[in-house]
Amino acid sequence: MGKLDFFKMVEELSLDETVTTLSGHSQHVCLDDYWLEEDEKFRFINFLQSRYPGYLFEIVGVMGGFGIDLIVTDSEKKAAYDSIPKTKTVRQAMQEAQKTQGMFIHLFSTRSLDEKITDKEYQSLINAHKKLSAIVQENIFEE
């Protein structure tokens, strides 16, 4: 296998755009089109850290290890997010959604049920479940 061109990867992955338009504190970027050996992962992360100061990068397995993603994190936005009190859990959102909608659609599969979340995230999960439940009821139970 030939040597990876990190500059080309940055261009192909649109990382310049990703770091400048990051809406939250972090975002996943799919790396499935790239085969990275462990030493290449380390070198790529170092390359990105030097190219984008103020951002953190991590390569993680996804889809049960069948894919890999690059997580791009804005350090300042992450610090601000971390300072927000996390008073609820994903499990509480799931239970509330099930209680209020009378049915449960598995929306929460990518997160730990014990993950602490902000009140805004809690409400967002409930609202997403409510919208999805309405779609399911409208399209499935209508027939």
Image (cartoon, helix red, strand yellow):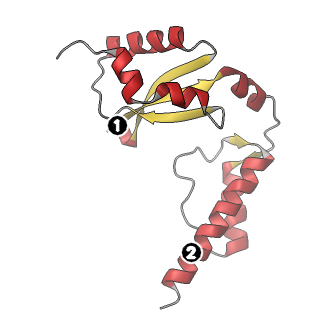
> What amino acid is found at the position of numbered circle 1 in the picture?
Gly
Q: Nearer the viewer, mark 1 or mark 2?
A: 2
Up the image or down, 33 lies above or below 36; here it is below
Q: Quadrant of residue 7?
A: top left
Q: Residue at x 60, y 12 (%)?
A: 53
Q: Is residue 123 left or right of residue 14?
A: right
Q: Position of residue 9 (x, y in %)?
A: 36, 23
Q: Quadrant of residue 12?
A: top left
Q: Residue at x 72, y 22 (%)?
A: 76
Please tell me how crowded label 2 is: few (under 14), some (14-19), or many (20+) other residues with Cα within 10 Å.
Answer: few
Q: Position of residue 51 (x, y in %)?
A: 51, 11
Tell me the distance, in whole angstroms, between the alpha carbons under discs 1 and 2.
Answer: 30 Å
Pick out the residue farthest to the left: 1
Q: Position of residue 139 (x, y in %)?
A: 50, 81
Secondary element under disc 2, as helix, strand or loop, is: helix
Q: Position of residue 75 (x, y in %)?
A: 67, 21
Up the image or down, 117 lies above or below 108; here it is above
- Label 2 belongs to which residue? 135
